[in-house]
Amino acid sequence: MNPSKSLRPRSRPVVLAALALLGVAACDASPTNVPSAPAAASIAVTITPPSTATEACQSVPFKGTVTGTVNQEITWSVKEGPAGGTITAEGVYTAPSVPGTYHVVATSAADSTRVVEGAVAVGPERIIALEVTPATTSVLAGGSRAFSAVVTTPCGTFAAQ
């Protein structure tokens, strides 16, 4: 009997078992050169224009941009609340009738901590038209005549008092 032939049947299961153990060990081993996950993207919000001026009751369009996320949605608001004017979901700001400096706020929908403000200097109402009634009249000496006036501004039409 050849000694090498008698060892073969017994050595084959041992070699296969050893290879199987090496494969399991390789699966459990922690790799040392695995790249770490990329850092979270930095979300930023910008608005254009960053500041502007307008007259009372006039509208100004703002454009917002969000970077660092696929969610480009912006929530618009006015820092001073309704007294500071209004702004649409599309970023169109309408100034109040009271002059002052107000602030448009753009907030990222992806991260509500990402906020930017724009300033709006609002000037006084401008008179567009003034209508006095009657336009012409005659008054006798010592007599009187009542007049009325209507003033039109960008904020509306008002009876003069």
Image (cartoon, rainbow, N blue to C red):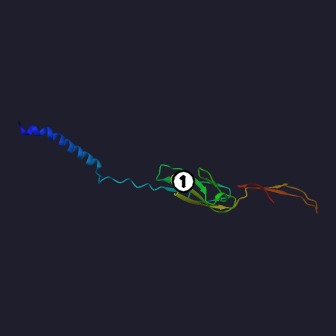
Q: Residues within 10 Å of mark 1 (few under 14, many from 20)?
A: many
| Quadrant (top left/top right/bottom left/bottom right) for the N terminus | top left
Q: For residue 40, what is the image quadrant? A: bottom left
Tell me what residue is drawn at x 91 percent, y 60 percent.
144
Quadrant location of the C terminus in the rendered image: bottom right
The count of marks equals 1
Most foreground residue, 152 or 29? 29
Report the front residue among 39 and 155. 39
Q: Disc 1 marks which amino acid?
A: Gly
**With 120 as the anchor, is 125 left or right in this view?**
right
Front residue of this view, candidates 161 and 24:
24
Apparent side of residue 35 relative to residue 76 in the rendered image (left or right): left
Residue 98 location in percent, x, y?
69, 61
Q: Residue at x 66, y 57 (%)?
A: 82
Residue appearing at x 65%, y 61% in the figure: 122
In the rendered structure, the answer to whether residue 67 lies left or right of residue 28 reads right
Instruction: Name which residue lies at 51% across and 52% down.
Output: 110
Q: Position of residue 46 (x, y in %)?
A: 52, 56
- Give 150 or 30, whichever is nearer the viewer: 30
Residue at numbered disc 1: 64
The location of residue 76, given as percent across then percent down, is 58, 54
Q: What x and y, as percent, mark residue 2?
A: 6, 37
Q: Which quarter of the picture shows residue 154? A: bottom right
